[in-house]
Image (spheres, coloured by chain):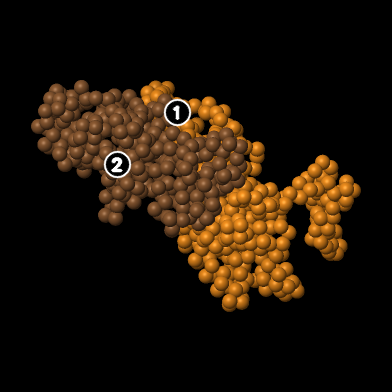
Amino acid sequence: MKSKLVPVLLGAAFGLAAATAASAATLDDVKGKGFVQCGVSQGLPGFSNPDDKGAWTGLDVDYCRGVAAAIFGDADAVKFTPLSAKERFTALQSGEVDILSRNTTWTMGRDTSLGLNFAGVDYYDGQGFMVRKSLGVSSALELSGASICTNTGTTTELNVADYFRANKMEYEIVAFEKADEVVAAYDAGRCDVYTTDASGLYAQRLKLTNPDEHIVLPEIISKEPLGPVVRQGDDQWFNIAKWVLFAMINAEELGVTQANVADMKNSDNPEIKRLLGTEGAFGEGIGLGNDWAANAIGAVGNYGEVFDRNVGPNTPLGIARGLNALWSKGGLMYAPPVR
Amino acid sequence: MAVQHTIPAESARASVFYDPKIRGIFFQLLLIAAVLFFGYSIISNTIVNLERQNIASGFAFLDTTAGFSIIQTLIEYSEESSYGTGLIVGFLNTLLIAFIGVILATILGFILGIARLSPNWVISRIAYVYIEIVRNIPLLLQIFFWYFAVLRAVPSPKNSVELPFDIFLNNRGFVTPRILFESGSGFAGIALLIAIAGIFFIRGWARKRQEATGEQFPVFWTAVGLIIGLPLIALAATGFPLGVDYPELKGFNFVGGMKITPEFMSLLLALSIYTASFIAEIVRAGILAVSHGQTEASHALGLRNGQTLRLVVIPQAMRVIIPPLTSQYLNLTKNSSLAVAIAYPDLVSVGGTILNQTGQAIEIIGIWMVVYLSLSLLTSAFMNWYNQRMALVER
């Protein structure tokens, strides 16, 4: 028995030592397995949420489909891993997912000490508060002494602490691991206030027993730039993640949509030609075909279409473009040119 | 040994190679080396990989400001405290729930186990139904049930249920007045300690006297008198240096007083009710293991039912009960980590928050494992000691 165990253990140890030299070329791994593994939330309407047929929908989901389309020309070459706020970074660090598109706030700490890179901002958000209308509260500054429900391990928890301390207000935090429990506890009256990113408040309000009895207070107490995240140390993959997002934003600016992307390939506008790969060879720079952007836009549409489809005014969430409008229309969405 | 001496020198050298004992030691050493190498390569691999991926490592983060608030703290803690302090707060909350949970589960479990064996058909059926229902429903579901069922049933702070002595019950918790100990009340504390020491002394004395003379002494009532009386006398002597902090409804919540959160209550209820059902079965098994002849003999000596149970059956049953009871205590402690589901800030919940804020998963998980392992080992060490004390002493 003993003599059998020794080689097994030694083999395992050497195997581990050998495993060190893996990862790095994420694109090759992704091409090898034939799909992109994308980390999403456990269910946030508008951002990443399974529909009644079990298919994932949402802004974060569409971004991942765009990445898959850019690589494979197939928006369905993607698998989704639902992750809690706590699990998300470890899942990305360990290689369980290739890209994390899970309404994750870009902060300096996360960008620099987790071995991760934020590929850009696909939604400019800020933290807000939701209360029952019956409380008669009209400003967050009237919330002293309130019980507040939120998620653990989010920037939200820290922002609340900062905001209440800065305004010298008392509060009691009730922090749950899963968003569903936060909503259930708030709905059951455990808390006076539910706080998370404003987009999340509109999304989660739909899950309450009587959504109309709750209002979102006007104060936005933090900057929450949400965006996709990749591992550090693989610049090629990082570039793909960045440029798929930029392509979607540029497409909106240039008027390229899901419907007209095929016709637009014949456009005379050199900017559109470069974006859609009929001029230049920009796809090569990121290790993809030159029609990478055309594929992504053909699959999910431009940024404006994705926004409107998932969270826009005509969806149950009914969120206005606001900060997320193009820079040319008074918003913050601005992408470097394809050139 | 004598045989070896007769073997020629050359084959003696060869026999070192074939000596089963030396071979054994050699392979043991080889195994240890392999295990050490295995451990070393895991650790060094981890460190190298973390560095290569630019992920922060080490325990320096424990001194960094936490920046988040915790709803229930047994020690001083604010947003400006360090992550390390936060972890200690979480650890103490785990200890609190485990300690009270173990006591409640034991009491409830013993009552149920004995009720299960009651000759009264109704009582034994009630205990049976309780045990079968509770122990067959997953604990997490029970925690959710207690949390959300209780939350829905209890009114908001403005419509609190008012109980006597300024005690309020609402969906933010159970609010009671808090007694403030002002300077001079330390004497009462000392008096309490003296009372406890006195009780142990009197108990020993009473037992010796009963063994010698057969006379009984009312130890229980003396103990009650001492534990209430002595501190009261001390308080009276120092002029009652006590204040009361009454809870008051201000704005959204009650301010002042003492508050037991719904998270704590529902976790405690779920853990103790669940574990009690297992303890009840252990107690039943233990009592059934004591031969019926013991009960009959005890009755023949003229002991009443209660005395028979307390003095004859339970002490013998304890020998069967304690070892499985230990594992139930360990289960309860470990199950308390389900707290994370309902926002009770135990070690896992607070640790999880820190893990997410700092991203140092390996360190935090390491701390969790070390803490739960040492808690479990300590509990079983204590129970082993108790088991030895209760074991049959052969004369």
Viewer-closest of A239 and A46: A46
Image quarter for residue B187? Answer: top right
Res. A339 in view: yes
Subunit ID for the residue under disc 1: A
Please determine whether, in this image, residue A135 is positioned above or below residue A223. below
Label 1 CA crowd tier, 10 Å (few <14, some 14–19, many 20+): few
Can you give x and y, in whole percent of width and height, for residue A297 in the image? 20, 37
Please determine whether, in this image, residue B207 is positioned above or below residue A178. below
Say which quadrant the C terminus of chain A sits in: top left
Subunit ID for the residue under disc 2: A
Say which quadrant the N terminus of chain A sits in: top left
Query: Residue shown at 17%/29% (left/top)?
Result: A272
Please determine whether, in this image, residue B99 is positioned above or below residue B159. above
Separation of residues labelled 2 and 1 (CA atoms): 28 Å
Residue behind mark 2: A307
Viewer-closest of B38 and A273: A273
Label 2 CA crowd tier, 10 Å (few <14, some 14–19, many 20+): many
